[in-house]
Image (tube, coloured by chain):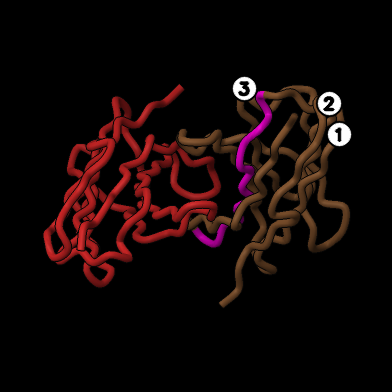
């Protein structure tokens, strides 16, 4: 099946630092989504991307849909303690009502 | 803001028992999904459901699993005879346009 490679696996950063994480795929995706999961809870949608090259922001978060359609990155600027959690990328081969393929997640720890 | 809800939040069951996990999707959504997340691992697709039938399922979704929409609001996942390896978080999701919204999950523990 399709696989998404997400990196890094985990990050420890100081409060106020910027963070970057990315996902790559061997196949083309037409939609990229970024989710955040807090312990014991469901994934919460952060940003959705639908077009190659698209750059979208949500507050301090910025995500881009790679031009090859095989990668995406998420940046978090000026991190704060509540940014702690696991960030997952997810892709759809066909946009719309199709299952999501998830990356393995990036565990972010923020040191105050 | 409308949200997906799931019950129970935690279910403990003995191996071989049947469990039913319940979800109430967002009311005007038409596509529904079940995903599974084994502790510490990624979220994996199980099954999608549209117009009262399964539209797609993964290899994980074998004969011990079934889904139903018994009424206009609930969406259920049944595991007929649970195994130890079924212990996981189970998430329901529903879709609006292209964005899938997840419920808070049910933690299933099989002993």
Gap between marks 2 and 3 measured at Cα: 17 Å
Q: Which residue is mark 1?
A: B18
Circle nearer the N terminus (2, 1): 1
Q: Position of residue B101 (x, y in %)?
A: 54, 58
Between the C-alphas of marks 3 and 1, the distance is 20 Å
At 29% from the left and 25% from the top, the residue drawn is A26
**What residue would you read off at disc 3?**
B59
For the colour red, the matching chain is: A
Question: Looking at the image, which is closer to me, B70 or A37?
Answer: A37
Q: SS at mark 2? A: loop
Of circles 2 and 3, which is in front? 2
Can you say whether A103 is above or below B101 in the image? above
Which residue bears the numbered disc 2?
B81
- Secondary-structure class at tag 1: loop
Q: Which mark is residue A93?
A: none
The chain under label 2 reads B
Q: Which residue is at 15% across, 57% downward? A: A14
- Residue A22 in magenta stretch: no
Q: Residues within 10 Å of mark 2 (few under 14, many from 20)?
A: some
Chain under numbered label 3: B
Q: Is residue B94 magenta?
A: yes
Tell me the quarter of the picture where residue B78 sits: top right
Q: Nearer the viewer, residue B59 or B88?
A: B88
Q: 10 Å neighbourhood of mark 3: few (<14), some, or many (≥20)?
A: few
Chain B color in figure: brown
> What span is in magenta?
B85-97
Labels 3 and 1 in the same subunit: yes
Residue B55, image x and y in percent?
67, 38
């Amino acid at each position: 099946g399709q696989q998404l490679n997400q990196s890094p696996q985990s990050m420890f950063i100081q409060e106020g630092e910027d963070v970057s994480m990315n996902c790559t795929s061997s196949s083309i995706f037409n939609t990229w989504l970024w989710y955040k999961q807090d312990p014991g809870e469901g994934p919460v949608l952060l940003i959705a991307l639908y077009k190659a090259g698209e750059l979208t922001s949500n507050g301090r978060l910025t995500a881009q849909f790679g031009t090859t359609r095989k990668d995406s990155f998420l940046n978090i600027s000026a991190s704060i303690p509540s940014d702690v959690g696991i960030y997952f990328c997810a892709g759809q081969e066909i946009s719309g009502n199709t299952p999501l393929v998830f990356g393995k997640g990036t565990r972010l720890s923020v040191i105050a | 803001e409308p949200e997906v809800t799931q019950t129970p939040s935690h279910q403990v069951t003995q191996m071989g028992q049947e469990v039913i996990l319940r979800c109430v999707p967002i009311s005007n959504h038409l596509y529904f999904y079940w995903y599974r997340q084994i502790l510490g691992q990624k979220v994996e697709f199980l099954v999608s459901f549209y117009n009262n039938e399964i539209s797609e399922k993964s290899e994980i979704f074998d004969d011990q699993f079934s889904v139903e929409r018994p009424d206009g609001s609930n969406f259920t996942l049944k595991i007929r005879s649970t195994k130890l390896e079924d212990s996981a978080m189970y998430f329901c999701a529903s879709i609006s346009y292209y964005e899938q919204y997840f419920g808070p999950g049910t933690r299933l523990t099989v002993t």
